[in-house]
Image (cartoon, grey):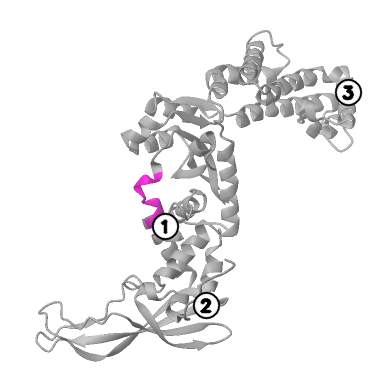
């Protein structure tokens, strides 16, 4: 824009009221707010009942919150003319639906500005309410209504979904227990390398029935298009997917497989700590001091960390821990292998080794082996479906935690689901011209 073309100043265009069917007739500026006096551009004095020409009968004032201009809340004071038909005595007002919805307190531009701020800029409703000089409930109701109309009710939102992830999410912590929802994520953009994952839907509860019911309510085209379902170790999600999506491949993602092996390692360390010392680990105990180093991949260990592990494994009391640590490292190495076939072979050997010949004293490895053996098909399916992981699902869970923190918590689940879909649903202004 080195040589822009200038035109005559136009207050209507600058304040974005021309698209609302208004024109500015006056202004009142204060440090805390700005007020623009407007009138309706189109004059329509014709009676809609008999077609007669109406007689002006004064004006009424309609106040609307508008997009903040100059870092201060801006209001539109619209002088709306009233008419009375001399023939049928009908009374009406000028049409202001271009400026705002009936009975609305925000202009249409203000609603879209607030929606854009929530979806793209991830601002809080409280901050938007301060910028618009409106109550929290007024802004929240407007954002949720516009979001449902423009984004959530878009019939194309579920098009092209081939890979989904499913997980549970705690949306509210209470003194009488936590409340959970089941989150369904579209992982197709991650697999195809076209963008980030996006939240498809949230359903109250966390069970096989919840996920199966959600799948059953989707269209035949949607269910037929799903090729892969990424999930954690919860068998309820797998059973629901097998019943409702029999042609889809279930994939247990690496995050949870490594987490299972890591949990076995931690449990073995804690058990040996209690058996050898009679208490929990404390600062200064070799096992307690090595708890983080044990979780570090072999290829990432520093010389100091390697020496620490040598000292831990040098004791005959820690032989069982070393065996469990070795299995954990093999699981990590399988997923870090640059070749998918080689990684699959490495993990297959680990599962086969845990299926037989594990000493009874290695209770953590025996339990891990039963789990890996039961879900072996789902675990190994990851290597045949590169790019399919539930990791982005965990990332979206983190985004939802940030949303709850920004809002200082939610009490209404419906509002939370709508806000979560708007915040993490992958909506962008290029996809939705109304938000440009």
Q: Which residue is mark 3?
A: 310
Residue 81 is one of the magenta-drawn residues: no
Residue 94 against residue 243 in the figure, above or below: below
Q: Give the image location of residue 206, x and y in percent.
A: 48, 38
Q: Residue furthest front?
A: 3
Q: Give the image location of residue 422, x and y in percent.
A: 47, 53
Q: As drawn, is 81 to the left or to the right of 19?
A: left
Q: Give the image location of residue 23, x and y in percent.
A: 38, 81
Q: As drawn, is 252 to the left or to the right of 84?
A: right
Please name whichever residue, 343 or 193, is drawn nearer the observer in this view of the structure: 193
Q: CA distance from mark 2 to mark 3?
A: 65 Å
Q: Which residue is mark 1?
A: 433
Q: Residue furthest top?
A: 357
- Name which quarter of the figure residue 259 lies in: top right
Q: Which residues are magenta?
A: 150-157
| Residue at the (43%, 35%) spot, across then down | 211
- The crowding category of the residue bearing disc 3, from other C-alpha atoms within 10 Å (few below 14, some 14 to 19, many at least 20), is few
Position of the N terminus, as image quadrant, is bottom right
Q: Which residue is mark 2?
A: 73
| Residue at the (40%, 33%) spot, across then down | 212
């Amino acid at each position: 824009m080195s040589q822009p073309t200038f035109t005559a100043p136009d207050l209507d265009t600058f304040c974005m009221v021309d698209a609302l069917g208004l024109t500015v007739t006056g202004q009142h500026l204060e440090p805390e707010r700005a007020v623009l006096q407007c009138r309706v551009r189109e004059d329509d004095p014709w009676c809609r009942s008999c077609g007669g020409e109406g007689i002006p009968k004064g004006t009424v004032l309609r106040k609307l919150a508008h997009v903040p201009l100059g870092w201060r809340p801006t209001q539109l004071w619209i002088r709306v003319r009233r008419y009375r038909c001399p023939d049928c005595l009908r009374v009406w007002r000028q049409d202001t639906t271009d400026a705002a919805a009936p009975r609305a307190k925000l202009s249409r531009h203000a609603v879209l500005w607030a929606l854009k701020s929530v979806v793209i800029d991830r601002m809080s409703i409280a901050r938007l309410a301060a910028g618009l000089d409106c109550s929290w409930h007024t802004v929240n109701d407007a954002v949720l209504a516009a979001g449902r109309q423009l984004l959530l009710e878009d019939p194309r939102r579920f098009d092209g979904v081939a890979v989904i992830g499913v997980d549970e999410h705690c949306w509210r912590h209470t003194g009488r227990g936590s409340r959970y929802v089941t989150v369904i994520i579209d992982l197709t953009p991650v697999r195809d390398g076209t963008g980030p994952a996006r939240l498809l839907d949230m359903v109250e509860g966390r069970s096989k029935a919840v996920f199966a019911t959600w799948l059953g309510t989707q269209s035949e085209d949607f269910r037929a298009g799903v090729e892969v379902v990424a999930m954690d170790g919860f068998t309820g999600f797998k059973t629901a997917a097998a019943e409702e999506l029999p042609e889809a491949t279930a994939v247990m993602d690496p995050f949870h497989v490594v987490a299972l092996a890591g949990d076995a390692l931690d449990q073995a360390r804690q058990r040996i700590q209690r058996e050898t010392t009679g208490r929990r680990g404390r600062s200064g105990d070799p096992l307690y001091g090595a708890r983080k180093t044990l979780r570090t991949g072999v290829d990432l260990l520093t010389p100091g960390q390697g020496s620490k592990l040598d000292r831990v494994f040098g004791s005959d009391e820690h032989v069982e821990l070393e065996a469990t640590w070795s299995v954990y490292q093999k699981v990590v190495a399988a997923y870090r292998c640059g070749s998918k076939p080689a990684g699959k072979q490495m993990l297959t050997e680990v599962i086969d080794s845990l299926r037989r010949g594990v000493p009874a004293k290695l209770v953590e490895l025996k339990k891990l082996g039963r789990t890996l053996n039961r879900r072996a098909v789902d675990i190994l399916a990851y290597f045949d479906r590169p790019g399919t992981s539930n990791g982005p699902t965990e990332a979206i869970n983190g985004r939802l935690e940030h949303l709850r923190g920004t809002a200082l918590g939610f009490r209404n689940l419906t509002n939370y689901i709508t806000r979560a879909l708007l915040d993490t649903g992958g909506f962008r202004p290029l996809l939705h011209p109304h938000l440009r």
